[in-house]
C-alpha cells in the first residue's frame, strides 16, 4: 500500500524538485525525496520526473509515498534521571539533545529506547510500539520534565487532564530582545506553516487554539529571561508564539534569526515544572527540574539591566 500527494507549484515558488517535495510533505527529507524520484515515484505533469527538474509555477507534481517498513523500538541501556516512579507512571528529566521517540533518522538513543530497558513491558500501549508510554512530548533540544504512563488507564487519565488544560506545565526560556510588558498572554491559533510544511506558524483561519502565558524573570542587554505557562500544548507552541511576538527563543535554529547562537546547540528552553492529579489516588503531584548547566552558562554571559 502507498499514499499519494499532489503538489501544485504556486507563483514565485519555483525551486529544485526535491526541495519542493520536502517542503510540502513533513515526513520527507530532501534525500528521501531524491530517492523517490530515482525510483520513479514522482510524476511532473504526468511524466516521470528527473532529479534535476526545476518545476515552474503552474506545474503539478504527484508523489507516491510507499508505506514505511514497520520498526519496533528496542531497549537500550541509557541512563535516565527519574524524579518519581510508581506502578502507574514515571516523571523523567529529559536532557537536551535526546529525541523522545524513534522516527525517521532517529531509530535509537531515544527516551523510548531507554524507557523500554528500564520498564520492560510496563508501559502503556495506546500510542503503539514506537511511542509506548508517551503521554506528551518536548522537542529534542528542549530539556526538562516529561510524564510517562506505565499502563493504558493511567495514560488515558493523564491525557484527559492535558485536554482539559488542568495539567501544570511551566517552562523557562531566554528570548531575544526586551519584552514591553512584565507579563502577558499570547492567544494565537497554531497550525502547519502554509509553505514550509515542517514548521508550525500562527494560523488565524486554520490553526488550533493555542494559549501561552509569560512573565519576565529578569532583563538583560539584548535578551530577557522569562517564565512561561502553557494552557494548551501545540507542537512548537512556545517557540512559535515567542517568534510571533518578535522575541524568538535564543538559539532556536528554526524560528530564530538566521545567525544562530551555536554555543547553545538548540533553543534555550527548559520544561521546569510539571504538575498533575495522580490517576489512581487523586493526589496532586508537582515536580521541578533545576535549570541545566548550558542554560545557566548562557545567562552568566549576559549583562543584566538593573
Image (cartoon, helix red, strand yellow):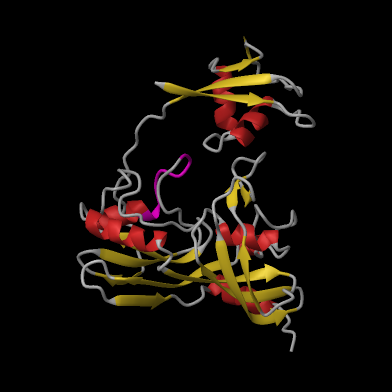
Vertical side of 36 occupied by 116: above or below: below
Tally the numbered discs. Answer: 0
Which residue lies most toward the right here? Answer: 12
State which region is magenta: 104-111
Q: Is residue 97 visible to the viewer in this orientation of the structure?
A: yes
Quadrant of the rendered image containing residue 177? bottom right
Q: Is residue 95 above or below residue 121?
A: below
- 30 shown above or below 286: above
At a point 53% along the width and 17% down the height, the residue shown is 39
Q: Is residue 265 visible?
A: no
Residue found at x 50% / y 55%: 140
Quadrant location of the C terminus? Answer: bottom right
Residue 254 in the image: state x and y as whole percent. 65, 52
Q: On the picture, is 37 further left or further right than 245? A: left
Where residue 211 sits in the image (x, y, percent)?
56, 63
Q: Nearer the viewer, residue 192 or 265?
A: 192
Instruction: Give the quadrant of the N terminus.
Output: top left
Residue 110 in magenta?
yes
Q: Residue 18's x, y, as percent? A: 64, 28
Q: Residue furthest bottom?
A: 306
**Residue 239 sits above or below residue 108 on the image:** below
* Quarter residue 15 falls in: top right
User: Which quadrant of the view contains residue 220?
Assistant: bottom right
The residue at the point 66 percent across, 82 percent down is 218
Q: Is residue 269 left or right of residue 272?
A: right
- Identify the residue at the far top of this view: 47
Q: At x 62% / y 57%, what residue is drawn?
A: 240
Q: Mainly helix, strand or loop, the magenta region?
A: loop
Residue 199 appears at what percent x and percent y? 61, 46
Amino acid at each position: 500500500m502507498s499514499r499519494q500527494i499532489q503538489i501544485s507549484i504556486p507563483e514565485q515558488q519555483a525551486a529544485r524538485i526535491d526541495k519542493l517535495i520536502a517542503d510540502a510533505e513533513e515526513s520527507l527529507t530532501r534525500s528521501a525525496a531524491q530517492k523517490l524520484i530515482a525510483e520513479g515515484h514522482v510524476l511532473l505533469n504526468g511524466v516521470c520526473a528527473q532529479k534535476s527538474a526545476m518545476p515552474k509555477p503552474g506545474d503539478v507534481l504527484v508523489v507516491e509515498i510507499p508505506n514505511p517498513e514497520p520498526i519496533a523500538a528496542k531497549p537500550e541501556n541509557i541512563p535516565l534521571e527519574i524524579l518519581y516512579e510508581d506502578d502507574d507512571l514515571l516523571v523523567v528529566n529529559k536532557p537536551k539533545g535526546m529525541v523522545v521517540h524513534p522516527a525517521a533518522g532517529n531509530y535509537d538513543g531515544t527516551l523510548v529506547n531507554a524507557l523500554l530497558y528500564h520498564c520492560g513491558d510496563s508501559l502503556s500501549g495506546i500510542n503503539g510500539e514506537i511511542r509506548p508510554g508517551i503521554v506528551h512530548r518536548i522537542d529534542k533540544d528542549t530539556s526538562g520534565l516529561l510524564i510517562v504512563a506505565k499502563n493504558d488507564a493511567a495514560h488515558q487519565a493523564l491525557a484527559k487532564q492535558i485536554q482539559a488544560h488542568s495539567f501544570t506545565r511551566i517552562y523557562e526560556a531566554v528570548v531575544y530582545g526586551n519584552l514591553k510588558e512584565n507579563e502577558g498572554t499570547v492567544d494565537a491559533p497554531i497550525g502547519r506553516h502554509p509553505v514550509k510544511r515542517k514548521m508550525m506558524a500562527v494560523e488565524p483561519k486554520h490553526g488550533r487554539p493555542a494559549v501561552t502565558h509569560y512573565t519576565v524573570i529578569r532583563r538583560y542587554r539584548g535578551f530577557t529571561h522569562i517564565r512561561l505557562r502553557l494552557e494548551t500544548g501545540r507542537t512548537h507552541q512556545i517557540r512559535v508564539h515567542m517568534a510571533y511576538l518578535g522575541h524568538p527563543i535564543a538559539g532556536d535554529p528554526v524560528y530564530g534569526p538566521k545567525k544562530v547562537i551555536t554555543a547553545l546547540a538548540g533553543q534555550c528552553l527548559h520544561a521546569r515544572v510539571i504538575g498533575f492529579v495522580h490517576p489512581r489516588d487523586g493526589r496532586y503531584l508537582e515536580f521541578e527540574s533545576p535549570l541545566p548547566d548550558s542554560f545557566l552558562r548562557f545567562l552568566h554571559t549576559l549583562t543584566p539591566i538593573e
